[in-house]
Amino acid sequence: MIHHITSYDDSVKQTWDAFVPTTQAGTIMHSRRFLEYHGERFKDESVCVWSDPGVRLKAAIPLARAPNTSDVVASHPGSTFGGMIASVIDPSERASILSAIAGTLLERGYRKLVYKTVPAIFGQQFDESDLRLLLRAGTVRRADLWSFIRIDRAYAFSAKRRASIKAAERKGVELRQAEQEADWVAFHTLLSSNLQERHSTVPVHSLAEMLDLRQRLEGENQLWLAYGPDGEILAGTWCFAYNAETLHTQYIASNSRGRELGAVDYLLAGVIDATAASSFKVMSFGINTLSDGYAINTNLLKQKLRFGSGVAVHWHFDVDLEQLANVDAGFAS
């Protein structure tokens, strides 16, 4: 099977971004609008696969050279998710495309691919056929447990969580969706204080980056804030619309008074209910895995389970490109 493969360049940006939401596993993390906020931090190696050269995409994969390496490429070092997105649903053709992409990367001098999958629950159509090739040509780098709620189905908070929510309401906690830039500034201050106090660290995104992403992803990110009866911001969550079906809590933060009043429980319950009333089908709470990619933050996982969450696996692979380029996908000719 012959595939028309080209390197990504700015001339196909609009075509790429229009293609992302039409694919099975495309997310905002695959879009050039998101990826380009990194500027020149990474050497881009993204690949386009065309049905009609230069006109109609059938697959694409965001790629960049892995930091501090010369022969390792990652999909994608600056994004939670990566991997191939495609309009193709036939597993045998997907396998052929992945092998062809591997051959292209070998020609560029790369030997290994770090591949971050999209948990299948976030896909617009459930499909894990690519895992067969990744397991055959590579090894598991991380297996993160990822919490989510199917809000298009019946869901229920635990009795303890419901009691906390009612108590916060009685104490005068209120929920509002942010609209002004000043709200983002206040939230970043809250987030920074929270991370410094509890983990001696800082947010992944600076205030400038957060404000940049707010504009880049206009209409696809939301900031929700919980206020005390005196107007103090007690807690907040910044959410990304990964795609048309999934809303993700990128950051959740609170101060000590917010924790005393149960503001986070009230905040998340309100956001979940508001999201369930919209067109979204999945509410994402992110990973519960520690930095080694295996050990679990049990307390964090239990907190999410009390909101009625399920658990998916977010796979990361180290893939030998030579093996992937020549892999026997197991399909009879």
Image (cartoon, grey):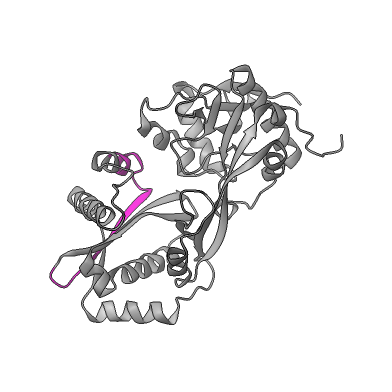
Looking at the image, the residue that sits furthest to the right is 333
Question: 62 or 14, which lies in front?
Answer: 62
Q: Does 46 appear above or below 230?
A: above
**Image quadrant assignment for residue 228:** bottom left
Residue 115 image position (x, y, % from top left): 57, 38
Question: 197 or 29, which lies in front?
Answer: 197
Q: Does 30 appear above or below 276?
A: above
At a point 44% along the width and 55% down the height, the residue shown is: 247
Asked if residue 276 shows in the view, the reply is yes
Residue 289 image position (x, y, % from top left): 49, 55
* Residue 277 falls within the magenta-colored stretch: no
Instruction: Quarter of the image for the C terminus: give it.
Output: top right
At a point 79% along the width and 34% down the height, the residue shown is: 328
Asked if residue 281 shows in the view, the reply is no
**Image quadrant assignment for residue 165:** bottom left
Residue 44 image position (x, y, % from top left): 47, 25
Total number of numbered labels? 0
Give the side of residue 96 with respect to residue 166, left or right. right
* Residue 222 falls within the magenta-colored stretch: yes
At a point 30% along the width and 48% down the height, the residue shown is: 201
Give the side of residue 9 with respect to residue 274, left or right. right
Residue 202 image position (x, y, % from top left): 28, 47
Question: 183 or 290, which lies in front?
Answer: 290
Instruction: Quarter of the image for the N terminus: give it.
Output: top right
Looking at the image, the residue that sits furthest to the left is 230
At a point 60% along the width and 52% down the height, the residue shown is: 120
Residue range in magenta is: 212-230
